[in-house]
Amino acid sequence: MKKKILLITEYLNPPYDEGIKKTVFNLFKELDKKYDLCVICRYGFKKVNIHIVNTNPLFFDSAIKKIIRDFEPEILLYLPFASMTFASYLRLFVLKKYTSKIKSIIFALQPKSLSKWQESIIKFIKPTVALTPSLLLKDFWDRLKFNNKLLPLYTELNDFKPIGDNSTKILLRKKYNIPLDKYVISHMGHLNEGRNLESLIPLQKAGYQIVIVGSSSTPKDSLGSDQLKQKLMNTGIIIIDKYLEKISEIYQLSDLYIFPVINNCSSIGLPLSILEARACGIPVLTTKFESTNFFLGNDYGNVFYSKPSDFVLVVKKINKFNSDRLKTSVTDINEKYNQIIFSEIENS
């Protein structure tokens, strides 16, 4: 008899073109193979065990309660979308009321600043275990005495892998109209001010070709201004802001992946794009963002850490480092992810 797992989140619908949606979908696929799974979400796709609900922000709904009671889950796994807001904790409180005394697991990808009065409330809303790739969120949970663990993120290695030779890179650049003779530096993510994208302008002016791929799943209230986009494009930066079926090809045509984010609430705790770039054999230049160094380190000499003000200087030095670009710890990180999350499910 397969264990009954209840997965609750907000978005399970395609396209899967940004970190949180990819993480939810990857988790869904594995749970669906291994367990008797029931999903409740706001947006999803047609499948017999996926219930798409039109409900209030807290999921306080008699229809949701009936779905849960009829299913009789053994484990509740809740993955809030975006950051761990005060509403996320209140939603967990409501869901726990529906699920009686079963094991509850919360899997949150990034922190959110909370007020003192909010903290005083949520310290009483504890899951059985809380999982996160965010060092900041883990520290917060430690302070509230939550039972919690650091969890890396999973990278789909069937999609993200090195290309065979330089001729393939040339073909990919032709496909996406990327200059063939330039040193290409790419970035994937939401096109908004919180991503510190203006720090890439000096690199473009220094003669490198910056390519930014924006997520088509970016919420409208998180979109950057048209002025930001135009300012970047005016310098020659190429912006692709439509859905790409094979975003892996952008990594593969690149010479370097860059992650300029500084604000801890502007990305998930372990940026999935950095893992994807390394899985494709592309070196990475990044700020010392959240848990990147904790989980990935320098990845056999292929991940470089820098302040944005030093990006131009560091890029000049990167090609002088001799390392095996294809050697990466991403496979080990995947194994660690599977070991932690599925051991929590099995040990209940």
Image (tube, rainbow, N blue to C red):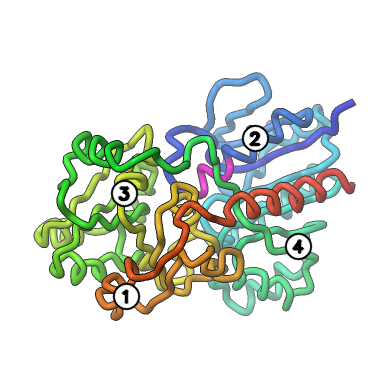
**Residue 44 relative to residue 218: left or right:** right
Q: Total number of numbered labels?
A: 4
Where is residue 96 drawn, in percent x and y? 78, 49
Residue 6 position by quadrant: top right
Q: Amino acid at mark 3?
A: Gly
Q: Give me the residue at 30% from left, 65% from top.
A: 193
Where is residue 329 drawn, in percent x and y? 59, 56
Q: CA distance from mark 4 to mark 1?
A: 45 Å
Q: Earlier in the sequence, mark 2 or mark 3?
A: 2
Q: Amino acid at mark 4?
A: Ile
* Label placed on residue 125: 4
**Residue 22 relative to residue 250: left or right:** right
71, 229: nearer the viewer: 229
Q: Earlier in the sequence, mark 2 or mark 4?
A: 2
* Label placed on residue 40: 2
Q: CA distance from mark 3 to mark 4?
A: 36 Å
Q: Give me the residue at 72% from left, 50% from top.
A: 94
Residue matched to label 1:
314
Residue matched to label 3:
214
Q: Give me the residue at 30% from left, 45% from top.
A: 253
Q: Amino acid at mark 1?
A: Val
Q: Earlier in the sequence, mark 3 or mark 4?
A: 4
Q: CA distance from mark 2 to mark 4?
A: 21 Å
Query: What's the magenta region?
Result: 19-24
